[in-house]
Amino acid sequence: MVRRLSGEEVAVGQLLDLVQEIVTDYALFRILHDGRVGDVGLNALPGIGGFGQTAEGGTGAVEALTDPMRLGDIILRTRELLHEGDPTGGCERACYECLRTFRNQFIHHLLDRTLVLPALQALEALEVNPVQQPSAGLSFEELEAQCQSDFEREVLAAIRDRGLPLPDEAQKTIYDGDEPIATVDFFYAPRILVFVDGSPHYRDYIQAADTRKRRRLKALGYRVVVVMAENPEAGLSDLAARVGG
Ligand SMILES: [Zn+2]
């Protein structure tokens, strides 16, 4: 996704459409291939008139436009090409140095660089943000298979049903150096620990180690969330506040 100055988010495909609209296919082709922003490869643009995200080979251009540095370069270069800061002032609307080409001569009367420049200048503070990928971790079924009690399975289902991210691991042992401190029911990388009260090992943990170990986990930088059978909602809300959703 790309965030524009207004805060509005547009997808890469829409950005391609926008760039295509405002600089014309051929100007973009020249910009991408003039060697100053780096050649995006001859396959990047399927054809002078067929620049689109669905066509074969379109990914090179998508990559070029999603790399913030290159995208910034492309936009600056485009503004330059449209005579921004040109000491001679540039052409009135369009010339063969900017938007006009032999191939687009039948629309020369429509080309006007002064309509294009403000749109490009408005992209000045554009930021490119990677789309957050869904976790490639364990599936619900894989996590469920590692649960050691019905209540753990219920909590896992509740996490899913609330639309919260699934834990990265289940039954994970947390170490301080080489020393195992505790086994947590659910673990969210890098440091959220979920204890589900009701599972036998959790009771052992509580009885044997009590709050001292939990303090130790917290001192190690972990966030500890406890979901108790008596009041699972409280623990789930705490978890939601920490993992989002
Ligand atoms: Zn010109």
Image: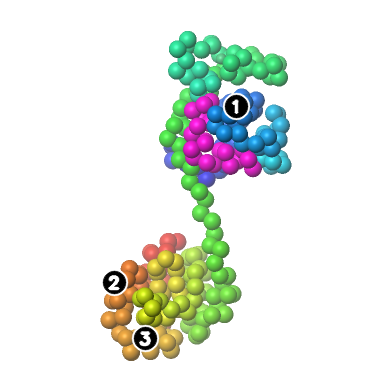
> Number of labelled discs?
3
Residue type (three-letter) at the residue carrying disc 1: Asp
Q: Position of residue 162 (x, y in %)?
A: 49, 67
Q: Residue at x 58, y 70 (%)?
A: 139
Q: Circle 1 is placed at which residue position?
A: 34
Residue type (three-letter) at the residue carrying disc 2: Ala
What secondary structure prevails in the magenta region? helix
The circle drawn on residue 219 is 2
Residue type (three-letter) at the residue carrying disc 3: Tyr
Question: Is 55 displayed left or right of 90 in the figure?
Answer: right
Query: Helix, strand, or loop for circle 3?
Result: helix
Q: What whole-number distance in Å separates the C-alpha atoms at marks 1 and 3?
A: 66 Å
Q: Circle 3 is placed at which residue position?
A: 205
Q: Residue at x 38, y 64 (%)?
A: 241
Q: What whole-number distance in Å separates the C-alpha atoms at marks 3 and 2?
A: 17 Å
Q: Position of residue 240 (x, y in %)?
A: 41, 66
The circle drawn on residue 44 is none
The quarter of the image holding the C terminus is bottom left
Q: Few, some or many C-alpha atoms within 10 Å of disc 3 (few <14, some 14-19, many ≥20)?
A: some
Q: Few, some or many C-alpha atoms within 10 Å of disc 1 (few <14, some 14-19, many ≥20)?
A: few
Q: Start and end of the magenta stretch?
A: 59-78
